[in-house]
Image (tube, grey):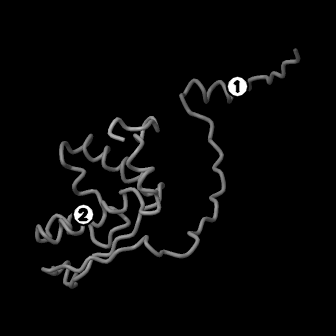
Amino acid sequence: MVMVTRAVRPEDIARLGAGVASPVPKMPAAVVKFVGGMDGRELTVPLAYPVEVDGELVAVVKIRRPVMREWRAYLRACADAVRINGANADDLVDQPWVSISAATLEELDAIDASRVESAMESFFEPSASMGAAESESSTPTTGEESPST
């Protein structure tokens, strides 16, 4: 068996001793575009009780389906907010896919806020393109037939 080794330089030893990790090279970002545009990826929720935020009228809230990168960053920000500021601090973490801040969402009329949150949740429901039999007859974790069928 052939082994390739490299001599460890003094600066490598110093860096390791200081707990400094080697820089990880960044992969170039891929250019990704949704085929067919934004159809079905955006919703507009009109407010029954519009609000004024910093002197500007907000009569509608625009929401788009988040991409995974945004969703993961949001979940990390929520976890950090709770860790640093305590329970419910994640209520004030902004969602970049929503046209208003989290603080503004908290100040909306309860029915308007509920309609906005319902619209956001609709993005996370199984898509209509998934066959009804497929979504109802199997469990998400095992794929086995459910006992009710």
Q: How many marks?
A: 2
Rendered view: 105 above or below 54 = above
Q: Is residue 4 left or right of residue 69?
A: right
Callout 2, which amino acid? Glu
Where the N terminus falls, by quadrant?
Answer: top right
Q: Which residue is mark 2?
A: 117
Q: Which residue is mark 1?
A: 10
Residue toward you, 106 or 19 = 106
Point 64% across, 60% down: residue: 30
On residue 118, which mark appears? none
Residue 17 x/y as whole percent:
57, 23
Question: Circle 1 — which element?
Answer: helix
Point 41% across, 56% down: residue: 132
Residue 108 x/y as whole percent:
14, 70
Q: Is residue 145 left or right of residue 30?
A: left
Residue 83 x/y as whole percent:
27, 40
